[in-house]
Amino acid sequence: MSEIKSARPLSPHLTVYRFRPTMAMSILHRITGAALYVGTALVVWWLVAAASGPVAFSYASGFFGSIIGRLILFGYSWALLHHMAGGIRHLVWDTGTGLEKETSTKLAIGTLVASLIGTVLLWLAVIVF
């Protein structure tokens, strides 16, 4: 019995696909989801420090008040808003709306833009008030 070889790949491969904004947002959605675990652990640390007394709370507050701490908080808030916007995009898709290529690309770009604008507005509100 002879085998017939096919020129097709056995399974889809990255070289088959063109990189699109929807792919980037899918990857970023997963990354922000993982980052939220780390950020939530830091929120838990802050809450435990607040419950543990003034010394522990001052140490945690000192960390979050530092440049590095504020950068982490900025990144955490962006990850939270980006993940939320991605979840809303998926809820829209679950209704069967926006699945066309052009619309899904616009929604993907809108997810990124909305999360960036939302993060900046949130931090401006925190700084001003």
Image (spheres, rainbow, N blue to C red):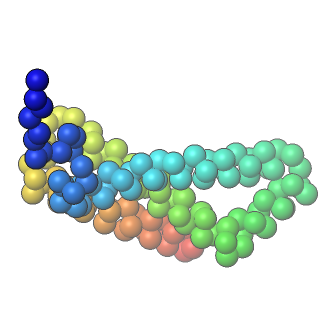
**Outermost top residue:** 1
Total labels: the figure holds 0
- Residue at 38 percent across and 67 percent down: it is 116
Q: Quadrant of the N terminus?
A: top left
Residue 51's spot in the image, x, y percent? 82, 44
Q: Residue at x 67, y 72 (%)?
A: 68
Q: Nearer the viewer, residue 26 or 42?
A: 26
Q: Residue furthest front?
A: 1
Q: Is residue 56 left or right of residue 65?
A: right
Q: Position of residue 117 (x, y in %)?
A: 37, 68
Residue at position x 66%, y 47% in the image: 41
Tell me if residue 37 can be seen. yes
The residue closer to the viewer here, 74 or 9, is 9
- The percent position of residue 119, horizontal first and vertical second, equals 45, 65
Image-quadrant location for residue 65 = bottom right
Indicate left or right for 46 with 36 as reference.
right
On screen, residue 108 versus residue 121, left or right, reads left
User: Which quarter of the image is occupied by the C terminus?
Assistant: bottom right
* Residue appearing at x 72%, y 73% in the figure: 66
* Vertical relation: 40 (above or below) 121: above
Q: Nearer the viewer, residue 36 or 60?
A: 36
Q: Is residue 111 visible?
A: no
* Residue 7, percent from left and from top: 10, 47
